[in-house]
Amino acid sequence: MQPHFLTTLALVAAQLATQTAAGERTMTCGFTRECPETAACGATAYAITIEEKHAAAQIFQIVTDAETMTGRGYALETGGFLFQGGNANGAHLLTVAPQGSARYSVHFFKEPMAISYHGRCGELR
């Protein structure tokens, strides 16, 4: 039995959400602050894309330049978005507030540690 994973992601306010050819919704997040568990926070320029893969099952993927994570995504009625998922590298959690402010955290398995990113996400479209 595989453990459940949590995933987090956030998007840059200036970036525009796009729609894929198959009609899935997408959202882009940009992060300007990175906070490793064992070090001080610092500036960063990190971006991710969230892609809806199966609307009825609420299956989404977070795509980075290094890896892809699959999990559950929830567009909240009050605005905002939540992603919980992961892969063999760790658990991921993304929370996006209604106005676009976002937090993305990753909890790694190999060397138990966590890292969080602070930034903004566009609208899920």
Image (spheres, rainbow, N blue to C red):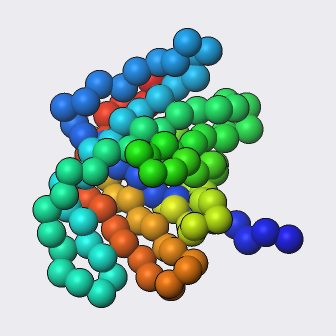
The picture places residue 67, in percent across and down from the top left corner, at: 51, 51
Residue 38 occupies quadrant: bottom left
Most extreme residue toward the front, as rendered? 66
* Residue placed most toward the observer, 76 or 33: 33
Q: Residue shown at 43%/46% (left/top)? A: 64
Q: Image quadrant for the C terminus?
A: top left
Residue 100 seen in this snapshot: no
Left of 32 or right of it: where is 72? right
Residue 104 seen in this snapshot: yes
The picture places residue 14, in percent across and down from the top left corner, at: 19, 31
Q: Residue shown at 49%/61% (left/top)? A: 93
Q: Residue shown at 22%/37% (left/top)? A: 13
- Is 8 drawn above or below residue 79 in the view shown? below
The number of callouts visible is 0
Most extreme residue toward the left, as rendered? 43
Residue 24 occupies quadrant: top right
The picture places residue 80, in percent across and down from the top left corner, at: 41, 43
Left of 23 or right of it: where is 34? left
- Is 94 drawn above or below residue 55 in the view shown? below
Most extreme residue toward the right, as rendered? 1
- Is 111 drawn above or below residue 64 in the view shown? below
The picture places residue 76, in percent across and down from the top left corner, at: 50, 42
Q: Residue shown at 26%/72% (left/top)? A: 35
Q: Image quadrant for the N terminus?
A: bottom right
